[in-house]
Image (cartoon, rainbow, N blue to C red):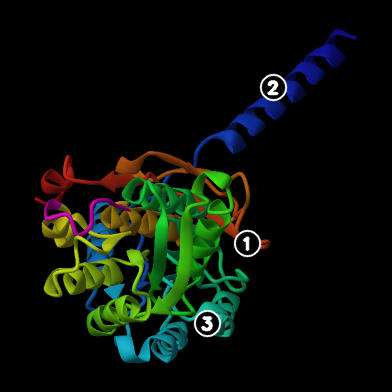
Amino acid sequence: MKKFLTTTAALALVSVMAHAAYAADAKATPGKSIDMVLLPKFLGIAVFDQAHTGAAEAQKELKNPKEVKFLGPTPENSVAGQIEIVTNATTQNVGAIMISNNAGDQIAPAAKAAHDKGIKIVTWDSPIPTAEGEDVFVAQVDFNKTGQVMADMALNILPDGGEFAILSASPDAANQNAWIKAFEQVLKDPKYAKLKQVDLVYGNDQSEQSYNQALALVDKHPNLKLIMAPTTVGIAAAAKAMQDEKLCDKVKVSGLGLPAEMVSYTMNGCAPQFALWSFVDLGYLTYYTAYMLAAGDLKAEEGAKFTAGRMGDYEITKDPTREKGLRVLMGPFTVYDKSNVEAAAK
């Protein structure tokens, strides 16, 4: 009887130890040689350069002898170019591809082909809507909260209400579409009843197009009081357009922008409030996640916990915005105005 109890106790101890090992946060194994591709929506955008800086920081910290490959298409060829880069990388024995998706579900077949060959597919900034071919999405913020932040900024700028329009990036940008959907959902609350959306246009994340679209909105809607641009290119272009045409007293600009690019527009009143997160941190966390998946240190499954260097502990969860997606949530938002934008822009 004593022997049975001892055996039972031993088995119980083994079970507890095994559970503890499973529950513990996964840690990265530095020094593995893994080719990794960081794919922005396209080249030439400051926030994507910042993400590259963060990814390069993580690569050095993890002692991966292979430098991160920062590959991107031109703005004019973003959709086809992203698909081509994923397809080419699949034939080059890379371990992971990190994609800020600008091609909607059009990129899914290429991502799936890569994934089927054992390549880890981590999206960041903008996911694959169906999640097909994707291991996990590193979300900069909770997409539903983006809508709330946008609605609150709009109400702060227009406390008495009025007409506003949305200047987005491209129709295929999954992140933009999700933010706008969340924004429009929040606006159904009676609290925001005096805010009236009159248009939604696209500048394709190109400065000149966004600038012209902003001016066209003013011409089309003579009572327009606010342009909400959830894109760093669009918000800066719209603010410049309002400033150039001396319309800042009539039409305000808000959305998601870089402090360094928005500081002058905030200080002169063209863009009283805007928000963003750290793209350096987003690139860093994305690289850590992809490296650990490719190195076998982490599994892309709900409930998996891991430590991402200086950024601390994270957990892979279901993505509430996509039926089949998994996500790692970074956060948080920072809202900028005259009180903090100058310090952040340095």
Q: Count numbered badges in the picture.
A: 3
Region in magenta: 267-275
In the rendered image, which residue does mark 2 sit on?
13
Horizontal and vertical percent for residue 73?
32, 86
Residue at the limit of the structure toward the right, as seen here: 1
The picture quadrant where one finds residue 63 is: bottom left
User: Which label's residue is closer to the chain start, 1 or 2?
Assistant: 2
Report the residue at 46% width, 57% height from top: 138
Please name the amino acid that badge 2 sits on: Leu
Horizontal and vertical percent for residue 231?
34, 67
Q: Secondary structure at mark 2?
A: helix
In the rendered image, which residue does mark 3 sit on?
107
Report the residue at 48% width, 79% height from top: 171
- Tell me if residue 277 is in the magenta stretch: no
Please name the amino acid that badge 1 sits on: Arg
Up/down of 167 relative to 219, above or below: above
The picture quadrant where one finds residue 42 is: bottom left
Q: Are marks 3 and 1 in contact (CB under 8 Å)?
A: no
Alpha carbon distance from label 3 to label 2: 48 Å
In the rendered image, which residue does mark 1 sit on?
322
Front residue of 302 and 279 = 279
> Position of 50 compared to 111: left or right?
left
* Magenta span: chief secondary structure: loop
Please name the amino acid that badge 3 sits on: Ile
Q: Are marks 3 and 2 in contact (CB under 8 Å)?
A: no
